[in-house]
């Protein structure tokens, strides 16, 4: 990954002008914020998840799910709802885009709020090439501050940023259909809400008009799509096919996020570890494999299987029942039946089938048997102790009236 590559763009090209524009905008916004808050307080989010995609691609629909997957609890920053001046409203109603200077100023200011320190989902930024360049300048600055404060007591406020770009892809037809679907949903809601006197939801003019919805998609394709592509080389970039059902889009997002740890590694490190399966791959068929093993115990090792079941019923379950509140029981056994490793696997599987999570360990204890009084040498025998930890969701106790 090229984190801090210098831009090599020929002078006089549109791109060159946009980079220059971005530098002016960024410097103005940054200086304004530094003057207002002081440089030491320009603490931006450690992890930024930039959610991009055409209108109707499902950014709003999937935000909650992405936040859960990344352990974020703060509200997402939805850029279009930050832009609520009358002028911005007029531009949005026509399907156009609000000026870069205004967007960058509002987004950066919002990101400084304390709840976003650890991370946040940013829905709808960047949307233009100038905004992309401003984002890159912000990340460069964050890295600069990270280095500057690295060995000072303020280091914890200036952590190295991680940037994920997640682009949800839908074609024009799907985008338009979904925008109009949203428009109909909100219109129906508002009709009911007006009759019942509850709060109305904001409806976008472009969600009610097929031509305007199409225009929004065109603006996305012409201005945003290219701009987002250029982030591929610089940050963790996730392309998600968002054409399918909500469940399939969720699955595609989850797969992308599972691979993110690999993306953060150096390629040589990644090659070294990639042969080990991902946890998500292992668990995919775990349930079917368990069923197969359980049936094979019954068919091929019936006697041993029933012996283990009896032992669990008589010895283990009474102990487990006594631990129903904490949800963790430990059972030690010296029963020779466990000398056969198959029985240990049976215990783990039987508990799993019944909804517990069991782990089996073998501990070896040295028992002194005799002492040679001349040499002082102690002779020991080894005893095997089988230790089982059985976990389950314990009983929830509520105290008081709360
Ligand atoms: N995968 C999907 N399949 C069908 N409808 C979807 C899907 N994802 C989102 N929608 C619907 O499409 C509309 C627009 O989705 P939304 O999340 O608001 O898009 P965005 O925030 O990207 O503009 C909503 O009515 C939503 O319920």
Image (cartoon, rainbow, N blue to C red):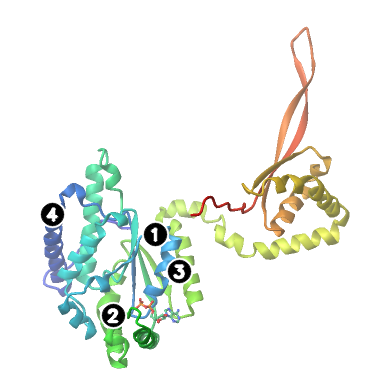
User: Which of the 4 image quarters holds residue 5?
Assistant: bottom left
Residue 163 appears in the figure: no
Residue at the spot x=55%, y=56% of the render? 275
Name the element at disc 1.
Answer: loop
Q: Quadrant of ligand 1?
A: bottom left
Q: Label 2, on which residue?
A: 220
| Pointer 4 local density, CA inside 10 Å: few below 14, some 14–19, many at least 20 | few
Instruction: Give the CA separation, mark 4 to mark 3.
Output: 38 Å
Instruction: Give the CA separation, mark 2 to mark 3.
Output: 21 Å
Q: Label 4, on which residue?
A: 36
Q: Residue 253 bears which disc, if any?
A: 3
Name the element at disc 4.
Answer: helix
**For the N terminus, which image quadrant?**
bottom left
x%, y% of residue 140? 23, 55
Residue 210 appears in the figure: yes
Instruction: Give the CA separation, mark 3 to mark 1.
Output: 18 Å
Instruction: Give the CA separation, mark 4 to mark 1.
Output: 28 Å
Q: Label 1, on which residue?
A: 73
Do callouts 3 and 1 mark residues in contact (Cβ within 8 Å)?
no
Spot the residue most to the top.
374
Residue at the spot x=63%, y=49% of the render? 327
Question: Which of pointers 4 and 3 lies earlier in the amino acid sequence?
Answer: 4
């Amino acid at each position: 990954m090229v984190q801090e590559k210098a831009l090599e763009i020929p002078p006089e090209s549109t791109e060159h002008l946009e980079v220059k524009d971005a530098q002016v905008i960024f410097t103005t916004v940054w200086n304004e914020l530094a003057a207002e808050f002081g440089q030491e307080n320009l603490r931006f989010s450690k992890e930024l998840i930039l959610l991009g995609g055409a209108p109707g691609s499902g950014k709003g629909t999937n935000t909650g799910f992405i936040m859960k997957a990344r352990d974020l609890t703060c509200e997402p920053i939805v850029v279009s709802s930050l832009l609520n001046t009358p002028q911005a409203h007029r531009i949005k109603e026509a399907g156009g885009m609000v000026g870069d200077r205004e967007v960058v100023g509002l987004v950066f200011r919002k990101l400084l709020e304390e709840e976003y320190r650890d991370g946040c989902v940013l829905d709808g930024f960047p949307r233009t090439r100038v905004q992309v360049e401003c984002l890159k300048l912000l990340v460069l600055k964050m890295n600069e501050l990270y280095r500057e404060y690295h060995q000072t007591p303020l280091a914890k406020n200036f952590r190295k940023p991680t940037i994920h770009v997640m682009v949800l892809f839908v074609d024009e037809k799907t985008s338009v259909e979904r925008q109009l679907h949203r428009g109909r949903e909100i219109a129906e809601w508002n009709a009911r809400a007006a009759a019942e006197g509850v709060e109305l939801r904001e409806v976008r003019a472009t969600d009610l008009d097929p031509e305007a919805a199409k225009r929004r998609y065109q603006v996305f394709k012409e201005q945003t799509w290219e701009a987002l592509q250029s982030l591929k080389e610089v940050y963790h970039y996730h392309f998600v096919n968002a054409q399918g059902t909500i469940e399939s889009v969720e699955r595609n997002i989850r797969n992308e996020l599972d691979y993110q740890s690999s993306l953060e590694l150096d390629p040589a490190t990644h090659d070294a570890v990639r042969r080990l399966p991902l946890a998500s791959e292992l668990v995919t068929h775990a349930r079917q494999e368990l069923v197969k093993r359980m049936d094979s115990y019954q068919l091929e090792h019936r006697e041993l299987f029933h012996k283990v079941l009896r032992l669990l019923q008589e010895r283990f379950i009474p102990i487990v029942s006594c631990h129903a509140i904490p949800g963790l029981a430990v059972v030690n056994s010296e029963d020779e039946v466990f000398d056969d490793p198959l029985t240990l696997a049976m215990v783990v599987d039987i508990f799993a089938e019944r909804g517990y999570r069991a782990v089996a360990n073998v501990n070896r204890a040295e028992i002194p048997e005799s002492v040679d009084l001349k040499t002082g040498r102690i002779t020991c025998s080894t005893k095997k102790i089988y230790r089982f930890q059985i976990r389950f969701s314990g009983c929830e106790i509520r105290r008081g009236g709360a």
